Structure formats: structure tokens, C-alpha cells
Image (cartoon, grey):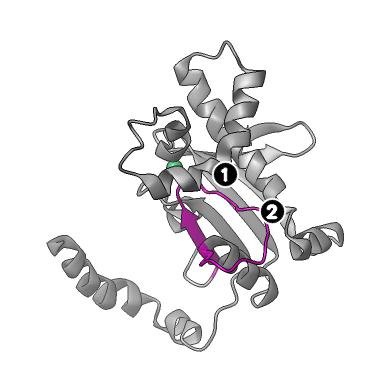
């Protein structure tokens, strides 16, 4: 924790001092152009892999970068609320759903009930990925465990893009060309980001 306290001082003295004008402007309002939906995983750092500055990305992160299907709920739905706010109040132009390699959330789909025993909330959260697991089991029955890992992560990204279309406001804006949707796959140990090509249905290395 000590390093984080020291980091706060270094941030104020260096990063903030070097970008004072930007932070003063941001102190009055935010106008992010992109909603970034990523995994909570400590290795997935949206601003690092996009080189974005503060104020550019409205970020929501959760286990396995899941987009819950749209509904007006009585529980406390953090991700759905953040998506709603980004679209309606902030008027973002893009949504990126970013999955990643070695994702513990995606891997947990193959855990035994015993392994999930002390994680009831995680288990319940991941029930949303039952269709992803089913799709992988049906379409890739002969995949090795290593192959199954990245296939699941990529199938999950596409499934979450589909879930975005269950939000009436997203569907309308997407059809009118006011909102663009992207599926990204980040490979941690290679520093590579792949973009899902909706026409070819394949992930293509960016750049
Ligand atoms: Zn993850």
C-alpha cells in the first residue's frame, strides 16, 4: 500500500503538474467519446492500452466484461446503470467491449461447483455466460484446454456485443449511425489488441 501513497504524491507533483490545463478543464465537466467495457482484471488497464487521456473514456469494469441484458431493475445494477448513463447523459459515440487473454472469469465457466462454493456472487454473476459456454461446447467440441480458453474469451466478446443490442437506446443509435460498437481482444503477454471485424466475424490485429 505504501507504493500507492507515494504514487499519489508523485501523481500530484508530476502528472498533474504537467497537465494542469487539462485537469482544470476536466474539473468543470467530462465529455468522454467512448464507453469502455472491460474486465476488472488488474492487468487490463484501458488508458494504458489505448493511450487515452483522462476525460476520454467512460469506463465500466466487471468480472469477464459482461453486458447484462437490458431490463429496468429493482436491484442495484451497476453495469446497466453505467451503460445507460454513458448513452443518455454523456452521449458517447463509441462503445468498446474489451475482453482479454487468461481471463479468470471466462475460465471459471469450467469450474466445478466445489471450486465456486465460497464465491456465490461470482457464480451467480457468471450465470449470464451460460450461453457462451454452450456455444463453445457445441461449436468447438475438440478444442484443447488452451484453445478453449481463448475461444471462450472471444466468443464472450461477441456475445456481449449482441447483449448491447438489447438496450433500446443503443439499438436505435446504432441503426441511425450515431453510435459505433467494437469488440476488442487484448493479449496480455504480447501487448496485442485485436478488433472484431463484423463482416468476416474474425478478430484482426490492430495496426
Ligand atoms: Zn478477465
Task: State the quadrant of the N terminus.
Answer: bottom left
Q: Does the segment drawn in magenta span residue 57?
A: yes
Viewer-closest of 6 and 148: 148
Residue drawn at (24%, 77%) of the image:
13
Residue where numbered disc 2 is placed: 164
Measured from the top left, where is residue 3 in percent x and y?
A: 16, 61
Establish if 83 lies above or below 85: above
Q: Residues within 10 Å of mark 1 (few under 14, many from 20)?
A: some
Does residue 207 appear in the picture of this structure?
A: no
Viewer-closest of 148 and 122: 122
Q: Residue furthest top?
A: 142
Residue drawn at (39%, 27%) of the image:
112
Residue where numbered disc 1 is placed: 128
Q: Quadrant of ligand 1?
A: top left
Q: CA distance from mark 2 to mark 1?
A: 13 Å
**Mark 2 residue CB less than 8 A from any atom of ligand 1:** no
> Which SS does the magenta portion mostly show?
loop
Q: Secondary structure at mark 2?
A: helix
Establish if 98 lies above or below 51: above
Task: State the quadrant of the C terminus.
Answer: top right
Q: Earlier in the sequence, mark 2 or mark 1?
A: 1
Contact (Cβ within 8 Å) of mark 2 with mark 1: no
Q: Secondary structure at mark 1?
A: helix
Residue drawn at (22%, 66%) of the image:
7
Establish if 146 lies above or below 154: above
**Callout count:** 2
Measured from the top left, where is residue 142 in percent x and y?
A: 57, 10
Amino acid at each position: 500500500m505504501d507504493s500507492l501513497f507515494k504514487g499519489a504524491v508523485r501523481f500530484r507533483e508530476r502528472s498533474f503538474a504537467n497537465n494542469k490545463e487539462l485537469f482544470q478543464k476536466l474539473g468543470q465537466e467530462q465529455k468522454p467519446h467512448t464507453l469502455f467495457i472491460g474486465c476488472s482484471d488488474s492487468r487490463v488497464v484501458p488508458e494504458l492500452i489505448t493511450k487515452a487521456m483522462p476525460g476520454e473514456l467512460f469506463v465500466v469494469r466487471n468480472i469477464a466484461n459482461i453486458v447484462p441484458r437490458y431490463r429496468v431493475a429493482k436491484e442495484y445494477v451497476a453495469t446497466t446503470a453505467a451503460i445507460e448513463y454513458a448513452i443518455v447523459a454523456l452521449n458517447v459515440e463509441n462503445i468498446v467491449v474489451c475482453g482479454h487473454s487468461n481471463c479468470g472469469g471466462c475460465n471459471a465457466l469450467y469450474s466445478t461447483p466445489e471450486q465456486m462454493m465460497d464465491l456465490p456472487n461470482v457464480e451467480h454473476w457468471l450465470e449470464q455466460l451460460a450461453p457462451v459456454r454452450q456455444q463453445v461446447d457445441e461449436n468447438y467440441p475438440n478444442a484443447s484446454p488452451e484453445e478453449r480458453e481463448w475461444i471462450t474469451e472471444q466468443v464472450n466478446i461477441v456475445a456481449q456485443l449482441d447483449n448491447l443490442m438489447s438496450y433500446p437506446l443503443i439499438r436505435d443509435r446504432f441503426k441511425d449511425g450515431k453510435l459505433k460498437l467494437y469488440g476488442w481482444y487484448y493479449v496480455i503477454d504480447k501487448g496485442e489488441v485485436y478488433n472484431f471485424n463484423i463482416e468476416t466475424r474474425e478478430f484482426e490485429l490492430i495496426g
